[in-house]
Amino acid sequence: MKCINENLKTILYKIAGEKYKDLVTINIEWQNIVGAFLSERSKIIKYERNILYIRAINHVWLADFHLKKTEYLQKLKQNTKINIENIFFTI
């Protein structure tokens, strides 16, 4: 797992601006929660209206993400303090 230091986080937040701050936070935590292996097999598409959209690289990983959806949602809410209501996985 890659750990992003606080200086890099500060830079990312400045570049992203207030509009994308939640998305940056979610992206960092997604990598921490699922690990490097699964993080490389998924891509966060967008965070809109409290729904997180994530693309899986194929049907196998899509099924795996669906099986662990509740766990991922709970951990994301807990670690980010962002009101994520649902996660939609797609290919």
Image: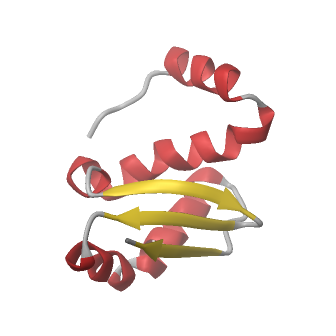
Q: Is residue 69 left or right of residue 48?
A: left
Residue sitting at x 79%, y 34%: 18
Identify the residue shown where x is 47% and y is 80%: 70
Q: Is residue 74 left or right of residue 19?
A: left
Question: How far across and down, in percent of the image, does residue 13 sit?
Answer: 65, 27
Task: Tell me which residue sits at (41%, 64%) in the image.
Answer: 55
Q: Quadrant of residue 79?
A: bottom right
On screen, 42 above or below 10? below
Q: Quadrant of the C terminus?
A: bottom left
**Image height of 12 relative to 18, above or below:** above
Instruction: Name the residue nearer the viewer: 61 or 85.
Output: 61
Q: Quadrant of the N terminus?
A: top left
Looking at the picture, tell me which residue is in the foreground, 73 or 45.
Answer: 45
Front position in the image: 53 or 5: 53
- The residue at 47%/64% (across/down) is 54
Way the structure is coloured: secondary structure
Count of marks, rendered view: 0
Percent position (x, y) of residue 72? 45, 69
Give residue 2's position: percent from left, percent from top: 30, 34
